[in-house]
Image (cartoon, rainbow, N blue to C red):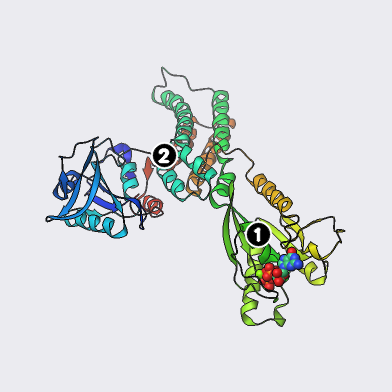
Amino acid sequence: MYNLDMNIIQEFDTIAAIATPLGTGGVGVIRISGNESFDIAEKIFKGKPLEAGKISHGWIEDNGTKIDEVIVLSFKNPNSYTGEDVIEIQCHGGVNVVRNILDLVLKNGARMAERGEFTKRAFLNKKMDLSQAEAVADLIHAKTQNFAIQSAKNLSGVLYRKVNEIRGKIFNSLSLIIAAIDFPEDVNEPSYDLLISQFEETVKEVDSVLACAKSSDILRQGIKVAIVGKPNVGKSSLFNKLLNAKRAIVTDIAGTTRDVLKETLDMDVAVTLIDTAGIRNTDDVGQVEGIGIEFSKQSAEEADLILFVYDAKSGLNKEDEEIYNLIKDKKHLIIANKCDLTDDRTDKNAIYISTLTNEGLDDLREKIKNIVCDFSAEETEFITNKRQTDCLIKCRDSLTKALDAAKSQELQDLISIDLKSALLFLNELTGEVITDEILNNIFDHFCIGK
Ligand SMILES: Nc1nc2c(ncn2[C@@H]2O[C@H](COP(=O)(O)OP(=O)(O)OP(=O)(O)O)[C@@H](O)[C@H]2O)c(=O)[nH]1
Ligand SMILES: [Mg+2]
């Protein structure tokens, strides 16, 4: 268990990793953090002596062999990302160049960093709280521009400040109670009415953060939209059109799609578009298609929105209706495809489209977008993840207990216990008190070099 307020002196070895993605690019960055960073860099860097806050130009050399011409950025603790001495070597962005330099750094005394270890050190050195550290991972993995912007807000400490504000209010109530307990002669107990109004206010504030949890989930994970229908109605053709790419195989043979295909679309919210195998009676089909059909049903089950497709020319038949019955209780759009083959437009519930002539596709896109936006319509002031939401729910539970106790005028000593536990859950959220297990779990989701 870490308790950062106990000021445990953390002793860290010096770690290093490649901070840029491995591949060919303009620049590659090798990051070193820890007490030995400067010593190690000076052993391999030929140029002017390294100076904190300055950019140095020179060569990385291995026993006289030139490895690459580089720029080195030097940071002295605590003025760095990790709060330790940090060296960043910017070299040319070839896979082998970066690897050679990293190898050299490791040979000279650094240890290969684990996933998220730089950010973990930043957290342990109090450069950021846990919600900010988690925002780093969110920002890197953001699938949409919108989510990236929201994550950046948390990185700047929006959630942290809000939690601190709530913590301050709870602390204030707690102090009133404790003062009266500790100095019964001099300090009066706070009135129950006062406590009730204070607790009601804090519960409301916690609720306001919790209200963002659902839209956070949607922003984080996106919305699943599954295309479902009989074989050969044009599901894969529609999938390709919506993606603007020839991703799925399209043929006139019923039962072409066997596997579930998934691709991401950015509609401000990340949309995972899912193409499925046409659903038909599994007695009539081979084993592979049968498995595909089971997957289709499962995808339909998990989807947030279903695009139910049927053939406009042949109209809705019994098989279509059976499939429709499977999905009708979910949010869905009914799509009559291949409308180029018929003039019939009598189904008032359907959107008539043709993936061949593009008729109706813009209208369909618009409708999908509207539904997707509805899912995430609530203003997301805060982005929370599951761990943070759980902490908030537990905090809220403790606060409601305190509120109920105040309403029934119980001993204030007892009320203070609930307040202390409410505070503890907020401390867990921001990482003031946290177990090794939780901490490792968080940073395991990072990439190496971050
Ligand atoms: N005329 C016309 N043909 C279409 C249209 N959309 C798809 N098709 C044709 O219908 C056939 C089936 O299309 P797919 O997209 O493979 O249908 P599917 O629903 O994915 O079929 P399965 O994967 O077998 O379930 C192909 O020959 C397409 O070219 C359309 O709007 N108009
Ligand atoms: Mg298909």
Q: Quadrant of ligand 1?
A: bottom right
Q: Residues within 10 Å of mark 2 (few under 14, many from 20)?
A: many
Q: Nearer the viewer, residue 27 or 396?
A: 27
Q: Residue at x 58, y 30 (%)?
A: 200
Secondary structure of the residue carrying tag 1 is helix
Q: Which mark is residue 427?
A: 2
Q: Say left or right for 130 vs 235.
A: left
Q: Residue at x 84, y 64 (%)?
A: 342
Q: Secondary structure at mark 2?
A: helix
Res 191 → quadrant: top right
How far from the left and from the top, in percent, is residue 390?
A: 51, 47
Q: Are marks 2 and 1 in contact (CB under 8 Å)?
A: no
**x, y percent for residue 212:** 57, 41
Name the residue located 82 percent from the left edge and 71 percent from the top edge: 318
Could you tell me how far apart the alpha carbons at marks 2 and 1 are, in whole angstroms?
Answer: 49 Å
Q: Position of residue 5 (x, y in %)?
A: 32, 37
Q: Is residue 254 above or below residue 174?
A: below
Residue that label 1 marks: 241
| Number of dots carrying numbers | 2
Q: Is residue 295 above or below residue 394?
A: below
The disc at residue 450 is none
Q: Give the crowd class for mark 1: few <14, some 14-19, many >=20 residues within 10 Å.
A: some
Mark 1 residue's CB less than 8 Å from ligand 1: no
Name the N-terminal-most of marks 2 and 1.
1
